[in-house]
Every structure is written in structure tokens, then in C-alpha cells.
Amino acid sequence: MRNTDIQNELNSIKDQKYAKMADSRLLYAEQSYNKWYTMYELAKQYRIDHNGSAPTEDYITKDGITLGKWEGTQREFRKSNELSQDRIDLLDAINFSWNVFDVRWDNAYNELKNYKKKYKNVDVSISYTTDNGFKLGEWCFRQRKLVRKIPPSHTKRNGKALSAHRKKLLNDIGFVWTPSQSKKKLKKK
């Protein structure tokens, strides 16, 4: 065998090796792409099934998929500029909340709306816990406390104060700001 034949054979082996590496990278990229869109579809369906609510951070589907964790990862990727604009746009289209505090508040608010639907009022006892373990009574207590202690001019979106928008949402469903309000109403009837 001549030197050139050996060199050609070595080049052929290298080309095959690089082709296999490129194929495996392409396969990985394709699997990653497909997984992201599968998770996106799950997030989209979750919102449809739960009246626009986002999953909690620890939510796991019946199939064992950690959808809540995936959503948290998308928030982190966006914060570190690792999420493409196309994916940001898709998530925005399903009303994805980029702020985890907003997600928590919105989920609690939806629990309160469910309570109202079930009990026909929003006068929640401080000890009330939903069937899924959420302490709705304590959440309502914190909303009352936030409104009483923090002047409206100091509202923030970081969870330390109740915004005017959130107060309006609560008022719109008849939130009881003073628990004794509802008892007084009942006595007057």
C-alpha cells in the first residue's frame, strides 16, 4: 500500500468519524427541539384546562413530567438571555408569566375564584385549606394585611405590597377586606 492510499483511507475514516459526530449532534439538537415544543404544548394545554392559570413550581403531570420546573427553567433562560425570541413570543402568546411572584399570586387568586364558585362567597376562614393543600385562608389574611399596612402610593410588583390592579381584581369578586363585614351583612338581612 502506498503512502497516498494510507492517507486517503485515514481521511475517509476521519470523515466518517466527523460525520457520525455531526449526526449525533444533529440528533441531539432535534431531540432538544422536539422536547421543548412538547413541553410548550403541555404548558399551553395546562392553561386551557385551568382557566389560564400557570402550574405551580412543583407541579408534575400524571405522566411524571415536571412542567412547573420546566417553566421555571424558561424564566431563568430568559433572564440570562439564553432563550430565543421565537420561544419568548410563543410563551407570551399563551400568557406565560415571566415573574414567579405573579404566578403564585394568580394561582392563589384562581383558588379564591374557585372557592367563590363552590361556596357562593369569598369570606374565607383563616384556617381554610383547599383540597390540593393550598392555605387559601392564610393567603386572604395576607392580602388584607398588605392593604392595611402599606399605603397605595408604595405599591410594588415584587410581592411586598398589593398593587391597585390586584386590589381591583379582589374587589371585583367581592373580596371581604374585614372578615366581620360579611357577618354584619348577614345580621342586617
Image (tube, rainbow, N blue to C red):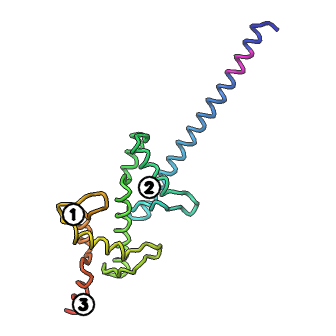
Q: Are marks 1 and 2 in contact (CB under 8 Å)?
A: no
| Above or below, 8 relative to 175 | above
Residue 95 in view in this figure:
no
Numbered mark located on residue 139 in the image? none
**Range of the magenta residues?**
9-14
Q: Is residue 34 above or below residue 164?
A: above
The answer to whether residue 13 is magenta is yes
> Seen from this angle, which residue lies furthest front?
149
* Badge 3 density bin: few <14, some 14–19, many ≥20, Cα 10 Å: few
Which amino acid is tagged 3?
Leu
**Mark 3 or 1, closer to the camera:** 1
Residue 115: % across, % down:
37, 76
**Residue position marked by numbered label 3 in the rendering:** 186
The residue singled out by tag 1 in the image is 164
- Quadrant hosting residue 1: top right
Q: Nearer the viewer, mark 1 or mark 2?
A: 1
Residue at mark 2: 44
